[in-house]
Image (tube, rainbow, N blue to C red):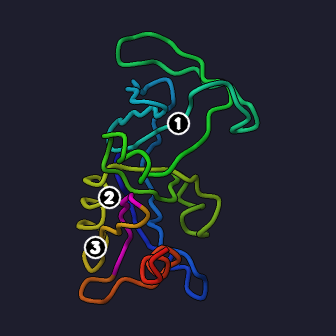
Amino acid sequence: MRALAVKVNWWEGWDTDPVLQLLVDELPPLDAFRFERNGAIYYAELDGYVRYYAYSRPGRGFGGRHFRITMSSGEEVILEGPWSSRPGAVHLHGFGPCVHVSITDDPLAFERGYTFFAGDVTLTFAQDALAEHLPDIELVRVDAWGEYSWVPCRKGLPLKESVRVKAMQKGE
């Protein structure tokens, strides 16, 4: 997977963190990934793209959809109704670091600015994409609620206030 273009949705006027938007040459299919498990987190990375699920028993995540995944051992596992998670929880289980992004392999979707997929990439992939396409943007580590994640920030400027930053300031 290669980053062809990058932009940032700054969510101006909204109280949420900025998100990288990536245009890539191709998104790897689920069956190409080999997962590792630590506790309830199933994690896999391929060419910089990250997939993970939170699963301890059958549930109603993804509307109860079944996901057939392959473990690094070669064993096939079916996750019934797993939940999505977030990079902070994945990091706590020893995986990553990874960055939440909006991602597409459709140049028209990238140009429009919508119909992306929610996804995750490795920190290294995100940093390399920024260095190549948006060198004035960096990823800043944000620690909140016992977890950490990475947020886009304009170099030399303070991190945009966000829900998490405000909560940290209030001591929540």
Residue in view at x 45 percent, y 35 percent? 28
SS type, badge 1:
strand
Give the answer, above or below, for where 32 lies relative to 151.
above
Q: Which residue is mark 2?
A: 126
The extreme front residue here reads 171
Q: What type is the residue that disc 3 sits on?
A: Glu
Verify whether residue 149 appears in magenta: yes
| Residue hosting label 3 | 138
Looking at the image, residue 24 sits to the left or right of residue 138; the answer is right
Q: Are marks 1 and 2 in contact (CB under 8 Å)?
A: no
Residue type at numbered disc 2? Ala
In-image side of 34 versus 116 (left or right): left
- Reply above or below: 136 against 98: below
Residue displayed at 42% across by 18% down: 71
Residue range corresponding to the magenta coloring: 146-153
Which residue position holds label 1?
A: 53
Q: Main secondary structure of the magenta part?
A: strand
Q: How many other residues sit within 10 Å of disc 1, few (<14), some (14-19) or many (≥20)? A: many
Question: Is 36 one of the magenta-colored residues?
Answer: no
Q: Please provide percent x and percent y for residue 14.
A: 60, 83
Q: CA distance from mark 3 to mark 2?
A: 9 Å
Residue 144 screen position, x and y as percent:
40, 67
Which residue type carries mark 1? Tyr
Q: Which of the two marks, 3 or 1, is nearer to us in this view? A: 1
